[in-house]
Each structure stands twice: as C-alpha cells, then as structure tokens.
Amino acid sequence: MDIVGLANYAVFMAILVGIYALLALGLNIQWGFSGLFNAGIAGFFAIGAYTSAILTSLPASGRVGGFELPMVLGLLAAMAVAALIAWPIGKICLRFRSDYLAIATIGVAEIIRLVVRTEDWLTGGVRGITGIPRPFGDLPYMESQMAYLAIVAVLLLAAYLLVERQLKAPWGRMMRAIRDNENAAAAMGKRVADRRLQAFVFGSALMGLAGALFVHFNRSVTPEAIDPMIATFLIWIMLILGGSGNNRGAILGAAVIWVIWSVSELLTDRLPTEIAIQAKYVRVFIIGLTLQLVLRFRPEGILPERQHGGGTAPPRA
Amino acid sequence: MPLLDMRDVRGGYGDADILQGVSITVAEKEIVVIVGPNGAGKSTAMKAVFGLLNVRGGQIVFDGEEITGWAPNRIVQRGVCYVPQVDNVFREMTVHENFEMGGFLRSGDLSAAYDRVYQLFPDLKAKRRNLAGDLSGGQRQMVAMGRALMLDPKLLLLDEPTAGLSPKYMEQIFQITRDVRDAGVSILLVEQHAKQALAFCDRGYVLATGANRHEGTGQALLADREVAEMFLGG
Amino acid sequence: MTLLDFLNFYLVPGIVLGAIYAVGAIGITLVFGILRFAHFAHGDMATLGAFIALALAASGMDPWVALPLAMAITAVIAIGVDRSFYDYLSRRPKILTVMASLGVALMLRAVVQVVWGVDPTTYVTGIVRPEEYFGILLRPRELNTLLTVVLIVVGLELFLRKSKWGKAMRAMSDNPDLARLSGVDNRKVTMLTWAIVGALCTASGFMLGINTELHSMMGWQLLLPMFAAAILGGVGRVQGAVLGGLIVGITEELSVFVVPAQYKAATAFALLLIILLVRPRGLLNGKVL
C-alpha cells in the first residue's frame, strides 16, 4: 500500500472508530455508570440505522420511505426511535436485577433482525436500502472522507462533553451511588427507577445515533451489516478493556479493539480460502477469550474509573 | 472447666471492631442468655463463637480445644450449631426435609435423631410433610431449632428465637429450650425480651457497646437496680 | 380445519417443540435458582452437545444411543467451563458472571463453527413417515422425544426429591446461607449442577436437531424461548420450566393464526415481556432476582 492508500485507510478506520466510540459511550452510560446490562446493542444500532435510512434515502419502488429528508432530521429521528423502543423495555425490566434486562435486550435485537429481514415494504428486506445521502458526498474522495470524519468527530466530542457534564452533576453522583450499593438504591425508591430508565434510554439513543452515522457513511444498509451477536460483543469488549465507568477509556477501547479486529480481518482474508473461513471463527473465539482474560486479570480496564469525590467504590468491570 | 470459654474477644465484620472485649462462658447443660440495648453487639458476640466474624483478639475455647478463627463448617462438626434469627428454615422444603438437611453431615442411621426431634416438637410430627414456609412463625422457629439439633450438638446458639412471636409462643419456645437443655445440650441465646429471658435462664450477661457490663444468675441480674434501670426499662 | 388436523398440524408439533424447550428451560432455571445468574451460554452449550452427539452418531452409533454418551461428555465440558470461566467470579457481582457467560457463548459457538462448519446438517437422512395412533400422527423421533423428556423430568424430580445431593441442591436454591450452615459443600453442589445442566443442554440441542436440523446458530435461537419458559414457569421451579416450555412451544405453533409465520420466534419475547409485566414470579411462584 502506498502513502495515499495508507492515509485513506487511516481516515476510513478513524471514522469507524468514531462510530464505535459512540456505541461504547452509550454502553458506558448504561453499564459503566448505572450497571445496566444491554445485550442488544446491535438492535438499537439497527433501529437508528434503518430509521435514518428510511427518512433520508432516495425513493425506491416497492418500499415506503425515500422521503429525502435532510440528514440532521435522520440523525434526530434515529435517536428518538431508539429511545422510544428502549423506554418500554426499560420500564418493564429495570424493576429487576440486570439479568432480566439482558434477556429482554437480546430479544429486542432478535426482533429487530426479524423485522429487518421480513418487512420488505419498510426495510427492503435482504436487499436493504440504498441511495442514502452522505453530506459532502460530492467532494473528491479524500475531502469527502475528511469531511465525514469531521462530522463524526464533532458529534463524538459533543456526546463526550455532554456525558462528562452529566456525570459530574448530581445525576451522575446518584447513579454511581445506586450502582455501587443496592441497598442505597432500594432506599431511594422511585427516583432510582426513573434515573435508571433515563440512563438506559439515553444510552440507547446514542446507539441509535451511531447506527445512523454508519448508514450515511456507507450510503446503504443491508441486514448483513448488522450481525447481532458479534457487533454487541465487540462493543462490550471495547468498554471493558478500555475501562468501564471512564468515558475516555470507552473511546480508547473502541480504537484499540476496532484496529485489532480490522487488521486481523485483513490478515485472515489473505489466507487460503479453506482456512480463511475457519480463521474468521477463530477470531470470534479469541474475542470471547479476550473478555475472559480482561475480566480476570484487568477488570478495571486500561483506564480505570476515576474516583469521584472520595468514593471508595472498588473498580468494576 | 466450662464447655465454652470465650475470653476478651475483640473483632468485627469488616475492619472496625464491634466487640471491644467480650468474655462469656457456658457450662454443660446450662442456659446462658445475652441481653443488652440495641447495638450492644449481642448477636455479634454469638456469631464470633460460630466463626462468622473476624476475631482480632482474645480466644474462644470449646470443649477443651481452641476454635478461634475456625471456619463455621469445622465448628459445626465439632458440635456447635447455630440458629440464625431470620431465614432460618428452608421454606420450600418440608419440615422433615429441613431435619434431613440438619443431619446432612451425619452418616448412618438417623432415626434416633428424628425421634428425639419429634419428641421435643410433637406439634411438628403431624406437619412433617408440610412446607416449612407455610407454618406459623413459632412453628418455623421450632423447625429451625430441630434442624440444628439433628447434628446432636453439645452447644446450641440461638439468635433471638422469640423475635416477632406472640407471648404464648415465646413461652413455648422458652419451655422447649429448657427441654433441650434437659436432654443434655448447653444453650447460648441472644434475647430482646430481656426480662422474660433473664427469668428463665440459668445465667445472663448484659453487654453494652461491645463489652461486658454485668453478669450473674438471671435472678440476680433481675434484682440488680442498675441493670433494671439501664436495660430493662425500670 | 378438522379437530384432528388442528391436533396433528399445530398442537402436536407445539407439544414436541415445547418439550424440547422445557428440557433447556430446566437447565436455565437450575442455574438461575441455585447459582443465581442468567446463563447466556446455555443455548450454545446445547449446540455443542448436539454436535458432539453428531460426531458420535457419525461413527456408526444410533443417534439415540449416542445421546446419553454426548450428555455425559457435555456434562464434563460444562464443569470445565465453570472452573475456567465462572468460578473465579463467584465473589464478585453476579452480573459479571452473566457477562462472562456471554463470552463463553461466543467461544462455544466458534468451536462448533471451526470444527463442524456452518452448513446445516442432520443426524439421519431420508423421509420418515408418521404412524397413526387413534388419528394422531406421530413420527418415531417425535415419540422418542416425548418419551425422553418424560424420562428426564421424572428422573430429575426423583433425584431432587429423594436423594441426599438432590436435596442439597434444592436447599442451596432455597436458602444458600443456611445450606452452608448445615454443612453443604457449595463447590460440590455447583459441580453437580453444571453436570446436570450440561447434560440437559445436550438433550435439548439433540432433540431439536433430530426433529429439525443442526446448525451452528440453533442454540442461540433456543435461548429466548428457553428463558421465556423458565421465567414464565417461575425461576427455580423444575415443574414450572416444563409448564413454561410447553406453553411457549404451543403458543409459537399457534401464533401463525395471528401473526405472519416469520414472527414465530417473536412469540417467546412477547410472552416474556407479558409475564415480567403482570407476574414476574411466574406461574408457579418462583424467585425474582
């Protein structure tokens, strides 16, 4: 690869890292700060992706949508719909231990997968949706990529600052108190339920936003783009390895894991076909094993949660 | 030599010492009661005997052997059984199964042990196939004591066995406690109902802020003006 | 549609499917009740067990003879998984074990995909005609499935009610602190539970495989209906898991009257949300974690 090719690849990677970092940030709000187990990240990602795709894409026969709305509206709608679907799920499941939320979110991801594949009139079925606009898409390749990277970076920074501010506010202090002490949580009663629901809904909205950014980057979306288990699991590894409870850790984890994941894909793709397919699954195995190793040997991640206001809570994974 | 000799024990659950030096002895076939205001460390003192506490000072000798720092399962096998105050039965198991779990560590024929328990708690014989969770509070307490007695302990530790029970059941539990003692088991119990407990026990200890305050026979303590004023509400 | 058509084309398949879910749900309810966490590798452990049975059957064994052997092998694997990936987390918040189990799910599935590939396969080839029993059509494999499930449920109930260690498992599920005070060895109960759970996983995966086909995602797709069944019946209740499994299986088959067939798999999710909303303890009053 020459220098230009390398630069192109680096920008391409950076955009995807930004999108994954948004997902990891969303999960950090849910798990890192609030102890809520979302095992259906890919579902909320897909909700955002398809919502924005339907609203902003060019008209196509045999499918509703093609409203050609501006991308900003697509992004906002993506967040709104993801939040709207998260709300009842959270409402039902957050009364119990997080195991139940995990089961229900797996369910959400599965149902979204079914809907995406089945409802041709809405999602284009297996063919998916094409003709999704990309801002500055008319510029030459490199400029266009740089422009998109800037958009992702600005949104990521905005999300980061917003979450950091919330975290330092009483809201964040209370969330950590709830997370670290079930008894304190029980004593605070209904307000706790509301706060947890807010955290779950807000985190899911960020995941929806990431999905929307993903489709505008690709200009198309198909069900293949969203493999529920792998996508969800990659985000989990990013957060746990980076340092759950630490927003910078979440972003760092996204960068590290995405680079490793992509480079390993490049490498395995060069293997002879018979082995390449098996190598793909070996990579999945290693990702699963990595989680176990991090949980065991470095549960606080690369950047551990900073102790706020003299709290003595032990670092969590 | 007393069966249990707990001398100047200090310790707590975490780093802080709740017990600041507690000494308690229990002789063979004796009923000893620990009373005191809330937060005095009554239950904590009892848990220290059973190895549920980080003991950082003093020593606990049981039946001629030092058991300080032993794990509960080892202490059980040595002949000490403990009945917690709450959640002290298997609610979803029958009365008889609760007794079976009590005898879990014993091998061989347990029929003599069952006979003894049903003799002590005749009411439970008819209810042996009922779920423990379906019984009244007093009967549940009997199941809990019966479960502990299945191991044929030399010393039985009872943590507030009459908490939440009506006076009628309280009397019954005290009577059964005496029957158990008469069957050859020493008993150490913690009680909130100080007056009634001191009236029925052999000896008593009054604890306050994690240390011994008074001790003597139940009658002597009841007669003591200071004890009466401080802990028994006049 | 005649009554017999309804029985043969909807109810009987629903019961067979429900019986398979039931066996998986029992394992889930045991882990949930005794070890107190949601075991997300359950489905993929079922996949692994099913493929181990396939490997045995490929060596010339009758699949139904291979089943008990595969159950025993998976039991050992389940104990190994616990020792390697769950046990060291036992003193930390249970939700971390849930997370670890998600990782194990991925790892087990990857093993199946590497060793056996991703193409669907079957235990036996050829079409089997159903036999008629008083108008009810049953294939031998369906009859075997139902008999096996009955055998497993009765055997497990007897073990839990009558044997010393079965009672210890129930005691651990009922009141873990008191079980330990009574001298029950937590490690032994944990090992025993995993052995049983591994065997049950294999049975459910195998029976799904022999009635449909085997593929590397089969277990993951079992996960939602199995969890729905366990929670519907009441967490910690073996009989509840059986009841829940049958309800989920039958509802899935009947759902085609109401929603398009593609959404059969959504039935379990709907049942799960409804039960959590109106009766989180489940039909037989189980635990809520």
Image: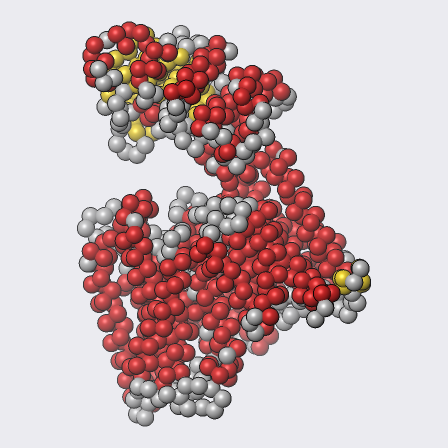
Q: On the rendered structure, is B33 left or right of C113? A: left
Q: How is the image coloured?
A: secondary structure
Residue drawn at x 48%, y 66% is: A229
Q: Quadrant of residue C117?
A: bottom right
The answer to which of B13 and A204 lies nearer the viewer is: A204
Q: In the image, residue A69 lies at what x, y percent?
A: 33, 86
* Of A199 and A309, the residue lying toward us: A199
Instruction: Determine the image quadrant of residue A184.
Output: top left
Residue at left offset 35%, top offset 76%: A78
| Left or right relative to A28: residue C214 | right
- What residue is rendered at 41% in x and 73% in y? A47
Residue C163 horizontal side relative to residue B157, left or right: right
Q: Quadrant of the C terminus of chain B?
A: top left
Residue A235: % across, % down: 39, 65
Q: Is residue B175 visible?
A: yes
Give C5 or A282, whichever is nearer the viewer: C5
Q: Can you tell which quarter of the image residue C207 is in? A: bottom right
Q: Is residue A118 above or below residue B202?
A: below
Residue A146 at least partly seen: no
> On the picture, is C4 further left or further right than C285?
right
Q: Quadrant of the N terminus of chain B?
A: top left
Q: Residue at x 24, y 57 (%)?
A: A172
> Residue C55: x and y, percent?
69, 60
> How many labels were placed on the picture?
0
Above or below: residue B222 compared with residue C19: above
x then y, percent, for residue C38: 48, 52
